[in-house]
Image (spheres, rainbow, N blue to C red):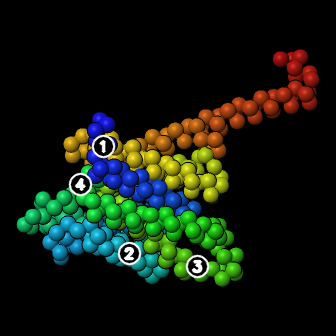
Amino acid sequence: MWSILLSSNTQWVLASTIILGIAAGLVGSIAYWKKQSLMSDALAHASLPGVVISFLLIGEKNLLILILGAAGSALAGSLFIQWVQSSTRITEDTAMGMVLSIFYGLGIMLLTIANRTAGGNQSGLDSFIFGQAASMVRFDVFTMLGLACLVILVVCLGFKEWKLYLFDASFAKGTGLSLTFMNILYTAVLVTTIVIGIQAVGVILIAALLIIPAVSARYWTHSFRWMLVLAAVFGGASGGIGTFISALGSGWPTGPFIVVTAASFFTISLIFGKERGILVRYIQYKLHQKEVHVRKVNTHPEAKGAK
């Protein structure tokens, strides 16, 4: 088992998925407070047609080109959501559901066509569905690692601006912060995180890596700063542990193991989280009951005798 860790390629893949998990946790926290967690799922599915179209155009699996194609497709999905929402009476969540299903259906159709072309079936495009980090070459790893670090840098350096943008947009606008620019930046980091993660986690499950660590962190703190830190820890740990487990088997998809690991952290947070965990809330409820009973006895001493 430990021989797997001695491989330099495995070490780089592990490093990239850990950094990806950290980036996903940070961006997912922003999406959580913006109440657009479903947006990550919609744009993840919307990226699939761009991946396949890029492959059909260049005829080879070049991760950087495929990422650019996925980004273009995801941005088209984002614009389509905004257009539907502004031009019709359709709500945002309905527009997201439409984009998710339409673009993903188109992507699967194109993927079927691509797999029937010469070399298409051997290209490994199917790994973009559920993710397969082990299939990444050194250039893929460096591309993913570099872009993930860029996302982390943007979120960390702009912490104060993100906080104003999310919690007090009016004050942010009054200080001269452009909300339009922040919306564009938010979409950019969200799309970047999605498209760099689809090779490792897959278009179906990358949304889970964006959503679950952020929700898990929410059970431990009310502070936005500490939520970012905890979400990054949960995301990074999920990426590293899930990738390591998937590397133990031959052809095991990475995405499901990463998501199951993230779900384990969520279960622990759901039960033991100090702010909103089930166990903590139960203990608080029991203490409150005891306090009410003591007050009742002190207020009405005869109640104690009656008992």
Q: Is residue 102 left or right of residue 93?
A: left
| Residue nearer the viewer, 295 or 179 | 179
Tag 4's secondary structure? helix
Label 4 environment density (alpha carbons within 10 Å; few <14, some 14–19, many ≥20): some
Contact, mark 2 vs mark 3 (Cβ under 8 Å): no
> From the image, which quarter does the C terminus lie in?
top right
Q: Residue at x 54, y 80 (%)?
A: 181
Q: Amino acid at mark 1?
A: Leu
Which mark, residue 75? 2
In the rendered structure, find residue 6 and report the number of the disc placed on it: 1
Please name the residue shown 65% across and 55% down the image.
223
* In contact (CB < 8 Å): disc 1 and disc 2: no
Which residue is tagged 3?
Answer: 179
Q: Residue at x 45, y 46 (%)?
A: 237
Label disc, if present, on residue 265 of the rendered structure:
none
SS class, disc 1: helix
Cα–Cα gap, marks 1 and 4: 17 Å
Q: Say whether residue 72 is left or right of residue 164.
A: left
- Looking at the image, residue 45 sits to the left or right of residue 157; the answer is left
First reached walking from the N terminus: tag 1 or tag 4: 1
Residue 278 to residue 98: above or below: above
Q: Counting other residues with Cα less than 10 Å from the Cα at mark 2, is it few (<14), some (14-19), or many (20 or more)? A: some
Q: For the residue marked with disc 2, what is the amino acid?
A: Leu
User: Of 267 and 122, which appears nearest the observer?
Assistant: 122
Q: CA distance from mark 4 to mark 2?
A: 26 Å
Could you say which disc has been placed on residue 135 in the image? 4
